[in-house]
Amino acid sequence: MASAALAAAPTETIRLHSRPGSTVAGSATVGARGAGTLVLLDVHGLASGSSVRALLHAGTCAHFGASFAAIVTATANAKGAVHTRGRVLFHGLPVDYSAIADGGHVITVVSGSCVVACGVIPGMS
């Protein structure tokens, strides 16, 4: 997936680290896109054909809030990888990048009912 989709806007590529008991890891490129935030998700280590969701939470990977904004739902390919894009939406409305690029928000990857990977969105410089 070309990161040229985010070229003119402020962006960050964050590492998504495996949670305890998980082999899932990867990255998410997060940035402003129009009135909202676009996320390019690249994760591996999933079971082939498994369904995953990427979510935005306030907090840290150790302690994130129960409230979330949806980013994307996808299915892992035969190699257990997901390469996709999605927009951050809260109750169906776009979330502005400046509201989440504060070091106080994380992206989680959920498979089944378990958070399998997490990464912190740093503050804008």
Image: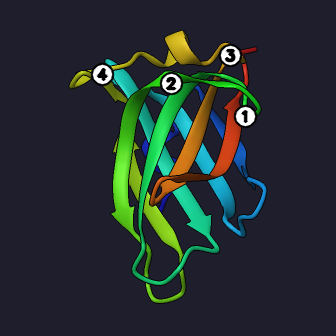
Q: Is residue 97 left or right of residue 19?
A: left
Disc 4 and disc 2 in contact, CB within 8 angstroms:
no
Look at mark 4 in the image and give the residue it sits on.
Answer: 94
Q: CA distance from mark 1 to mark 3?
A: 10 Å
Q: Residue at x 47, y 65 (%)?
A: 83
* Secondary element type, mark 2: strand
Front of the two marks 4 and 3: 3
**Marks 1 and 4 in Cβ contact (< 8 Å):** no
The residue identified by callout 1 is: 61
Query: Label 2 belongs to which residue?
Result: 66
Q: Earlier in the sequence, mark 4 or mark 2?
A: 2
> Could you say where residue 124 lies in the image, as x and y percent from the top left?
69, 16
The picture places residue 74, in percent across and down from the top left corner, at: 36, 62
Q: Could you tell me the amino acid type at mark 2?
A: Ala
- The x and y percentages for residue 47 are 53, 79
Type of residue at label 3? Gly
- Distance between the Cα atoms at labels 2 and 1? 12 Å
Of callouts 3 and 2, the N-terminal one: 2
Residue 83 drawn above or below residue 119: below
The residue shown at (74%, 53%) is 19
Colour treatment of the image: rainbow
Question: Amino acid type of disc 4?
Answer: Pro
Residue 119 located left or right of residue 38 = right
Q: Which residue is mark 3?
A: 104
The answer to the question of whether label 4 and label 3 lie on touching residues, with beta carbons closer than 8 A, is no
